[in-house]
Image: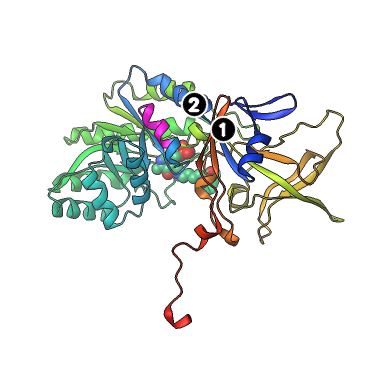
Amino acid sequence: MHDFSYHGGILHCGDVRLDRIAREVGTPFYCYSMPTLVRHIEAFEEPYKAIDHQTCFAMKANSNLAILSLMTRYGLGADVVSGGELYKATKAGIPADKIVYSGVGKTTEEIDMAISAGIMMFNIESQQELEVINARAGELGRKAPISIRVNPDVDPRTHPYISTGLRSHKFGIDIEASTTQYLRAREMDHIEIVGIDCHIGSQLTEVRPFIDAVERLKILIEELAQRGIVFRYLDLGGGLGITYSDEQPPHPREYGKAIIDTVSGLGMTLIFEPGRVIVGNAGILVTRVLYRKETPEKTFIVVDAGMNDLIRPALYGAYHEILPVERKAPETRTEKADVVGPICESSDFLAKDRDLPVLARGDLIAVMSAGAYGFTMSSNYNSRPRPPEVLVDGDAYSVIFKRQTYEDLVAGEMIPDTLR
Ligand code: LLP
């Protein structure tokens, strides 16, 4: 469910015409719907109303301070994977005790920062990381709360680049080796074992792999309990998929029910790290057609957004629906076209061989489902300023990131004296 629909033939976000925003902030731009974000948060939270839990929004999906402030208002915490994300979460008012820290490559500085902040827990991804965190906590005169990210060797049946829970992946600690690591952690002076964690991949469209992972974790939890290691938190990661085209992922209600049924009786506080399911369909990228280019082979629609603005199609061959902002009359001819950006790379496309109404120079199009891993994965490639982000609420919108300027592009760059 989202808030992007046609009124009078013009695509709106809430009550705001997208062509109006385009006129006022220029193109390309990201546009998010606040009511949709709220609805997604509430839908995700609903199944756990009566259950001890904490949802920690995966900031890698979208880390704009305004979006994070909304998460704070609704009681969400954050799943962070860098010092930068920890900084932004704190800046947005997310309490440290609602922050979990994941990722295979935490630096010493980042570890110190998180220990000092007093986060809920580190999700440990290797034996060496555990040792370093113990040492740093000792140095700082603190105890570091940890869970081990267990790699349950479950196939999430999603795109290989975004699946993480197989033994061949760099993530987590092998389920067989986890017992040993927990026993080691117990002997460490500056480590407090608080939880157990797994995250098997992203954009999952079935409940089964999640449940398989939990079932494997349950065996481990039982085994460790017999050895006197008990947990407060069971972190089930993120990964719930969304509809980009015709996928039919489980509704958060269905996912929640399956999880609750599987974990009942464990008596642990559930932690979730959803990203995409909250923000993915709450945001779009709006771009303007620069040129039509017809070659003997193909028709190209060249637009002013490129792979630097939205890299998912180039990186994963991801599908994003394309809608014209001004709806064409039903009798308008359609054509097969590639929607491409201005970047000097053949992989710079937003859609390939897509049936689209015939578009002309100046037309606006919306690239749908771009709220997750859109802006956060954008770059300045080809020295293109990053686009603005706006947040719509009803009949008003706010700019929540202003378009970068050319000066922004050179901020931080320095020419050594020898070259002056
Ligand atoms: N927790 C951990 C430890 C993760 O690695 C991730 C995503 C999440 C939570 C959130 O997963 P979600 O609920 O959003 O599926 N750039 C890719 C997605 C990469 C996901 C990486 N990890 C894309 O654009 O599809």
The answer to if 70 sits in the magenta stretch is yes
Q: Residue at x 33, y 46 (%)?
A: 87
Residue corresponding to mark 1: 281
In which quarter of the view is residue 274 placed? top left
Q: Amino acid at mark 1?
A: Asn
Q: CA distance from mark 2 to mark 1?
A: 9 Å
Q: Residue at x 21, y 47 (%)?
A: 116
Q: Residue furthest top?
A: 50
| Left/right of residue 115 with respect to residue 159 in the rendered view | left
Q: Residue at x 57, y 59 (%)?
A: 381
Specify which label sits upstream in the sequence, 2 or 1.
2
> In this picture, which residue range is highlighted in magenta?
68-76
Asked whether the residues under the numbered discs 2 and 1 touch, taking CB atoms below 8 Å apart as contact, a structural biologist would say yes
* Residue 154 shows up from this direction: no
Q: Amino acid at mark 2?
A: His
Q: Position of residue 320 (x, y in %)?
A: 64, 40
Q: Position of residue 179 (x, y in %)?
A: 25, 43
Residue corresponding to mark 2: 40
The answer to if 230 sits in the magenta stretch is no
